[in-house]
Every structure is written in structure tokens, then in C-alpha cells.
Image (spheres, helix red, strand yellow):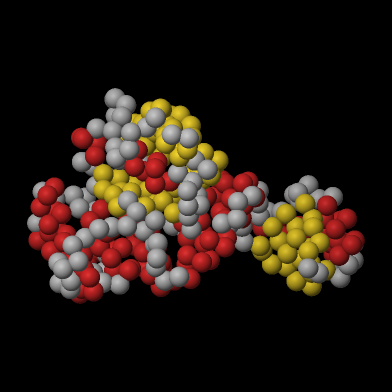
Amino acid sequence: MSLVIETHHLTKRYTETVAVDDLSLEVPSGGVFGLLGPNGSGKTTTISMLLGLVWPTSGTIRLFESATLGVHPNDLRRVGAIVESPAFYPYLSGRANLRYFAGIGDNGGKAELDRLLARVGLGDAADRRFQTYSMGMKQRLGIAYALLGNPDLVFLDEPTNGLDPAGVAEVRELIRGLGTDGRTVILSSHLLGEVQQVADRVAILSRGRLIAQGSVEELLRGREALRLHTTDDARATSILSALPTVTGVVANDGALTVNAPLDRAWELSRALAEEQVYVAEMAPIQTSLEHYFLEITGEATAAAETAEVGS
């Protein structure tokens, strides 16, 4: 597996505060990689170190499987990024802003800028002043900026911050598309549910430490569950608990929550029917990265996510 990012024991301390603590991370080439965690978990500091904007206290970084450790100018030529809020000149149009920054880095002519503006959905608004853009349009122009020079690796730090639900959906679809053309997109966010819809693999941070990394499927495997209404919940609990594919049965709000693979639902129904206990209703319980995060950390991010999406 080819890696675009590899860190070992990466640490950043600010006097008494440890922003990133002993982070060992592997990001494979291609697709969308989610860097997840609540605000203050160390995501932006991690990205800043990977971009050479912040010097690590200790640990090592390797980009693009380079022969030498560290962040080097030749590596950064293959990288695009927006960190926190994108900053543009308010009195210039979206096209003029992009032309200005493209000129600084010699990153493409008019045709390339037109292509990028169209890709992020700003073709019709390219000549409007930036100060007239909605928040979603500003974020999409920031993504166009990050794509200047056709980078192999793109960092997007909280690209849906401050967006309404429609704006979040627009940016989500854009990011999903970026991860299908061979480049690697690092998506930093505290909205675990949103990232689950676009990321191939994720790393979850809490208080500066890595607590899990892998594909979404790997992290959620074994956490599937079904909600059942039966004709006799007490007997059903005893019958189902004895099945080898069931790892737990809990009575909750007049129904049973059964931890079992969704593709073995037929087995549960058959075992109950053989004992004259019948299923009145059966439905899958969708497992999410947010529930997984809460389970392994106990941190309450749900309220923060709801408030952010609804703002």
C-alpha cells in the first residue's frame, strides 16, 4: 500500500498544553481520508505540522514516501490546502482572486482557472465580487484555490464550517468527486456523520491522541444491531442470547436491541419461530462513526454537531 503521509510519534506542545500527543498516522494514496475529532482535538495543529507551518516538538513526518524525513519544498509543490477559513480579497471577483493566487505560484492560465471554477460550481458567479458570495460559495472558492496546480494531495480543514444544510450537502458532493480522480483528499472535520458519507478511511483524534484509524467498514464492523418487536420479548431474549451470531440483547423502550450481523437477520427470525415466538417488526439500527466515537471516548459531540449544522 503506497502511503502519501506517514508520521511516527508526532508531538506538539505549547508550554503546558499538549496539542498533539504521540501521533503515528498512515494515509494511503488515493480517495478521501477523514481526520476526525471534536474542536480542540488537534486536527488543525496536525495539518499545520504536515504543511510545515508549525514545527513539531518531537516525532517524524514523511510525505509521498520520500527518502528523507520532514516537510520539504519539493513535496509541498504537490500539495494544496485550505486551513481554517479561506481568505480572499473582498473587492475582487472570484475569478480575479483565483488568478492572483495562481500567478503567485505560476499555477495555470485562463483555461485552467475556468475549469476549476466550473468544477466547484462557480462558473456563473466567477465575475461577482467575493464579498457578495454566500458562505458556501466562499468555501467552494477556497477548494478551487486548494486545487491550483493539480496537486496530488489536498488538505481541507473544516470546509463545511458555518454552512447551512444545503451548503454542507453541496460541499460534501464536491469532496466526494475529488476523491475519485486519483488524488488524496485529507478532510478534517468534527462532523463525524458528514465525513462518514464521503471518507474511505479515517483517523479519529481525541485530546490530541489517535484513538482509532482504518476504513469506516473496519471500525464499524461488529457494531451492527437490529431492533425487534416480538410476541414475547422475555422468551425472545433468552432464545436470541443463545445464538452464536448474537453478542448482546437489551430491552429498550418496548423493543429489543439485538447486536448481530444484519445479514443474519433471517437466522434470528427462524430461531424465534421454531420456539413459537414471532417477530412483529424488525429493523436495522444504523451504526455511525459518531456513535462509535462516543462509545470509545465518552465525549459528547452530538450536541456540537447538531448546533453547527443548524447554524
Q: Quadrant of residue 162?
A: bottom left
Instruction: Point out residue 73 in the picture as x, y percentages from the top left corner.
Output: 21, 35
Q: Residue at x 83, y 52 (%)?
A: 241
Depicted 133 relative to depicted 234: above or below: below
Q: Whole-percent x and y of residue 140? A: 29, 63
Indicate left or right for 81 with 7 as reference: left
Q: Which residue lies furthest to the top in this view?
A: 68
**Quadrant, the N terminus:** top left
Tell me where residue 247 appears, x and y as whole percent. Answer: 76, 49
Pick the front one: 207 or 174: 207
Please state if 273 lies on the left or on the right of 288 as rendered: right
Front-most of 103 and 230? 103
- Image label count: 0
**Residue at image point 75% right, 71% down:** 281
Is 1 on the left-hand or right-hand side of 223? left
Residue depicted at 48% across the width and 71% down the height:
310
Say which residue appears at 47% left-offset and 38% top-offset.
Answer: 17
Horizontal and vertical percent for residue 89? 18, 62
Residue 214 visible in the picture: no
69 up-or-down from 270: above or below = above
- The image quadrant where one finds the C terminus is bottom left
Between residue 16 and residue 103, name the one nearer to us. 16
Give the answer, above or below, for where 101 lies relative to 203.
Answer: below
Q: Quadrant of residue 261?
A: bottom right
